[in-house]
């Protein structure tokens, strides 16, 4: 069974609740299990990422909730922190644009592009390749 299968199985066990519904221990434990499975998947994609270490650190702070335990705000808030860390990890997975696309081109490139664009009567120019 792959980690994606584990994540899918975990997600299938989550339930939606409405106002007035009783919150059970699995309403805390199952999302944490899903986040742990997601952490393993992310670790396979970026083995040395310190953000994943931070995610694992947050997840380790969430205690396992048993029947009869009081569900505290920290349970919920740590899950929110973990989800925000997953967001940060996913942002880091996106390859940033090369530096030469972010910063202005050196003047000699600009003068060449400007001359070429003016030759063809362009009022604005984009460099593509």
Image (tube, grey):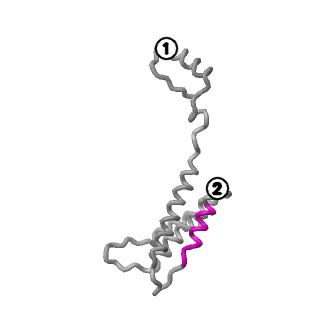
Where residue 3 sits in the image (x, y, percent)?
58, 65
Left or right, residue 100 beside residue 87: right
| Number of residue marks | 2
**Residue name at image x 62 percent, y 25 percent:** 106
How many residues crowd around disc 1 within 10 Å: few (fewer than 14), some, or many (20 or more)?
Answer: few
**Residue name at image x 57 percent, y 29 percent:** 104
Left or right, residue 71 beside residue 107: left
Is residue 64 one of those drawn in magenta? Answer: no
Left or right, residue 73 beside residue 98: left
Q: Compared to 95, does 46 lie above or below?
A: below
Instruction: Measure the C-alpha gap from mark 1 to mark 2.
Output: 46 Å
Instruction: Pick the quarter of the image with the C terminus.
Output: top right
Where residue 66 sits in the image (x, y, percent)?
50, 84
The dot on residue 120 is 1
Give the residue number, with chain letter if any, for mark 2. Answer: 46
Where residue 56 sits in the image (x, y, percent)?
60, 66
Please give the range of residues in magenta: 52-63
- Residue 10 in view in this figure: no
Is residue 62 one of those drawn in magenta? Answer: yes
Instruction: Pick the quarter of the image with the N terminus.
Output: bottom right
Q: Earlier in the sequence, mark 1 or mark 2?
A: 2
Q: Compared to 122, does 27 lie above or below?
A: below
Question: Most extreme residue toward the right, as rendered?
Answer: 48
Q: Quadrant of residue 41?
A: bottom right
**Residue name at image x 49 percent, y 70 percent:** 31
Q: Quadrant of residue 60?
A: bottom right
- Residue 12 in view in this figure: yes
Secondary structure state at the residue bearing disc 1: loop
Question: Most extreme residue toward the bottom, as rendered?
Answer: 68
Majority secondary structure of magenta residues? helix
Secondary structure state at the residue bearing disc 2: loop
């Amino acid at each position: 069974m792959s980690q994606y299968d584990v994540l899918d199985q975990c997600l299938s066990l989550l339930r939606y609740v409405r106002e007035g519904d009783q919150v059970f221990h699995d309403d805390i434990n199952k999302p944490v299990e899903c986040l742990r499975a997601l952490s393993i998947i992310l670790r396979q994609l970026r083995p040395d990422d310190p953000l994943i270490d931070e995610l694992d650190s947050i997840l380790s702070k969430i205690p396992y909730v048993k029947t009869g335990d009081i569900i505290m705000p920290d349970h919920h808030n740590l899950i929110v922190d973990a989800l925000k860390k997953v967001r940060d990890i996913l942002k880091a997975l996106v390859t940033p644009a090369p530096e030469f696309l972010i910063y202005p081109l050196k003047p000699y490139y600009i003068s060449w592009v400007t001359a070429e664009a003016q030759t063809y009567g362009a009022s604005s120019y984009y460099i593509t390749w």
